[in-house]
Amino acid sequence: QQKVQQSPESLIVPEGGMASLNCTFSDRNSQYFWWYRQHSGEGPKALMSIFSNGDKKEGRFTAHLNKASLHVSLHIKDSQPSDSALYFCAVDSNYQLIWGSGTKLIIKP
Amino acid sequence: GALVYQYPRRTICKSGTSMRMECQAVGFQATSVAWYRQSPQKTFELIALSTVNSAIKYEQNFTQEKFPISHPNLSFSSMTVLNAYLEDRGLYLCGARVSSGNTLYFGEGSRLIVV
């Protein structure tokens, strides 16, 4: 049974700083990984997907995947107050998404 | 772009009554619809997965008798919470996607408050 764990549980970063969020998974056969962001009172929105080992950059956001170490991370450069939200890592497993428990990111102006 | 609409956004219902929620995929054909419940602690529980041409698969702790789901076409799904009690409170999210490996798009959720 796939297990997905996220760390840290919460993170405070000054505006303009770098936020780094981590996620580990247990199934070595996992192929598809997503990061979702959920602002208060809204549904989760897909932020980025990553399928291959290495880095994937989209604007201020960089996802990193290392399947051998069962690790995926998200890095947010030049953090803005609007980046304050809950961030979830999700791993595709037999047509289901298995979710981490989330990281609460707070960007302090 | 791909959008998912959920309705209603929020319902307050008396203990023991039922609530029906709807999910509409716009801009794409959803071969797979997943219904989740997000707890007040923000964790996701998968209720059921509905895939075109397959029976609806309910997860442990969730039954068709309690959470009947209808998925009549590739753009619409509905779910009812029957005989709702306090433990059924939460944000019910509908996620729809084209296929495995593709992005799962969520609606804004239907919040159930039971009094």
Image (cartoon, rainbow, N blue to C red):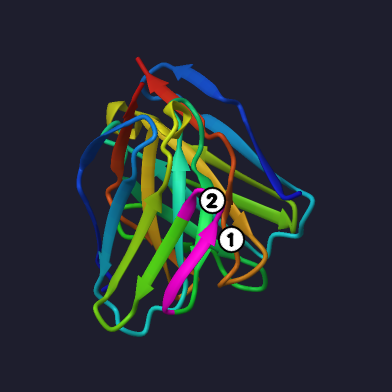
Q: On screen, B70 above or below A10?
A: below
Q: Identity of the amino acid at label 2?
A: Ala
Q: Chain of mark 1?
A: B
State the separation of the CA atoms marked 1 and 2.
7 Å
- The residue lying at 60 percent from left, 67 percent from top is B102
- The residue lying at 46 percent from left, 60 percent from top is A34
Which SS does the magenta portion mostly show?
Answer: strand
Q: Residue beneath label 1, please?
A: B103
Q: Identity of the amino acid at label 1?
A: Thr
- What is the span of residues highlighted in magenta in the rendered image? A53-61
Q: Position of residue A4 (x, y in %)?
A: 27, 63
Instruction: Determine if residue B66 is in view.
Output: no
Are dots 1 and 2 in contact, CB under 8 Å?
Answer: yes
For label 1, the crowd category at 10 Å Cα-Cα, with few meaning under 14, some 14 to 19 and many 20 or more, is: many
Q: On screen, B108 above or below A21?
A: above
Quarter placement of the C terminus of chain B: top left
Instruction: Label 1, secondary structure: give it.
Output: loop
Q: Is residue A59 magenta?
A: yes
For label 2, the crowd category at 10 Å Cα-Cα, with few meaning under 14, some 14 to 19 and many 20 or more, is: some
Q: Nearer the viewer, residue B18 or B52?
A: B52
Instruction: Count numbered badges in the picture.
Output: 2
Instruction: Determine if residue B111 is in view.
Output: yes
Q: Residue beneath label 2, please?
A: A46
Instruction: Label 2, secondary structure: give it.
Output: strand
Q: Position of residue B44 (x, y in %)?
A: 35, 47
Q: Is residue A11 left or right of residue B17?
A: left
